[in-house]
Amino acid sequence: MALRVGCAAPPGRAHDNKTGSWRVFKPVFKYEKCVKCGLCEVVCPEGCVYEREDGFYVADYDYCKGCGLCVEECPVDDIEMVQEEK
Amino acid sequence: MMEILEGSHAVAEAVKRCRPEVIAAYPITPQTHIVEALASMVADCELDADYICVESEFSALSACLGASAAGSRVYSATTSQGLALMFEVCFNVAGMRQPVVMTIANRAMGAPLNIWNDQQDSISLRDAGWMQFYAEDNQEANDLHYIAYKVAEDHDVLLPAMVCFDGFILTHTYEPVDIPTLEEVDAFLPPYKPVNILDAKNPMSLGMYATPDYYMEFRYEVEEAMKRARKVFADVGAEFGETFGRDYSGLVEGYRLEDAEIALVAMGSICGTVKDAIDEMREEGKKVGLLKIRSFRPFPSEEIKAALAGVSKVAVLDKNISLGQKGAVALEVKDALYGTGTEVLDYIVALGGRDIRKRDIRAVADLAEKGIGDQFYGLRTEVL
């Protein structure tokens, strides 16, 4: 993103604000016990969990903040928090 | 035209000629006469500006920030506790790169409550990203406003500027001031052309939030703009000199430094007293000179190093103290001279309006000669 004087941005630029480098843990979807209930998509505060074509769910790591809500709420414990690379 | 004016009115006349479209300020001693005069000018239709009456300094600068973001040339003035109340907004103004010009009538910070002059207020905001120019007399206070607007609004800079001049010592003192005509100022200072502007037809947000992956680059941009401001100030100051006959091309100004062994370093109105004291000492054969710092931000490290190259001792007169360390100006001068072997001695003087006379300057020079420094000068030991 080209820097604009005074942190100026036209509408629609919120997508530029990717999570970047500060996330410490991220959710990893294991697809071992997943029942495709979609609760992870519902509870994601960033709206970055979405349904794939095969019906399973995945997080868009560009925007995921690693809050862990999907992991906490998954009824079958099929999502795991994994530490980012050190 | 030469007029006899008090400093506040000299500044108000300068601001009037800069044609600000929005003025928002809250009166506070010793700045009051500036904004009183400007309010009268607006009321009497001498100045075509919106004067926004606000309930606090925080609101004053916030209004200026919004008006500047909408493309107006804006002005405010404050001092001491008022500037402290603007602290948060000051960082926002600089970060959003709005060329707000604000006059600081330098005054001591409380507690204890004190309305008299020192430079603690503006010095304490040196890290906010505002340029800071210090005036020696009312003429310079007047002239620096034209220059401040032109430098601040230059697209290579786009940073806010404080024009600082000493409360009461200058604000309430009458001196002859050569005030340029409106036409002359119009020729020197073109209308403000903003880069980014809040406009409903072309929606845009200013001062967006920046994640850790972007924030540092924005801060770097401000720092680079501050570095560019050095040259822009020198160029604009030289242009001002060619136009009006008073040269401000120097971020610092030397006085009888050519063969000086001891250099006094100071900012603001104290420089006039120092010059008189130096004249007396020179007559006695003492090789003393003055280096006046006009621009504290951007800090002219290279210019200071060059100007003080042949000096063995430097005595800095600080009208402030960074408590727990020493005077802020001395610290920065020391940084500029690091590695040169020049001894830098710090003297905390004239806090809270305590008078400083020629004999005090001479005493400081004597102390510096003996290598005695880094102290409060003029403490009343009987009340300690």
Image (tube, coloured by chain):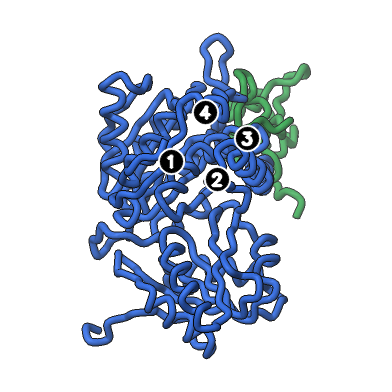
Chain colours: A green, B blue
Identify residue for label 1. B178
Identify residue for label 3. A76
Q: Position of residue B291 (x, y in %)?
A: 56, 66
Q: Give the spatial CA distance, label 1 vs label 2.
A: 10 Å
Identify residue for label 2. B246
Q: Residue at x 46, y 43 (%)?
A: B90
Instruction: Pick whichever, B92 or A79, lies toward us.
Output: B92
Residues marked 3 and 4 touching at CB (< 8 Å): no
Rendered position, A23 above or below B352: above
Q: Give the spatial CA distance, label 1 vs label 4.
A: 12 Å
Q: Amino acid at mark 3?
A: Val
Label disc, if present, on residue B184 of the rendered structure: 4
Residues marked 1 and 2 touching at CB (< 8 Å): yes
The answer to whether dots 1 and 2 both sit on one chain is yes
Binning the other alpha carbons within 10 Å of mark 1 as few (below 14), some (14 to 19) or many (20 upward) gives some
| Quadrant in which the C terminus of chain A is drawn | bottom right
Q: Chain of mark 4?
A: B
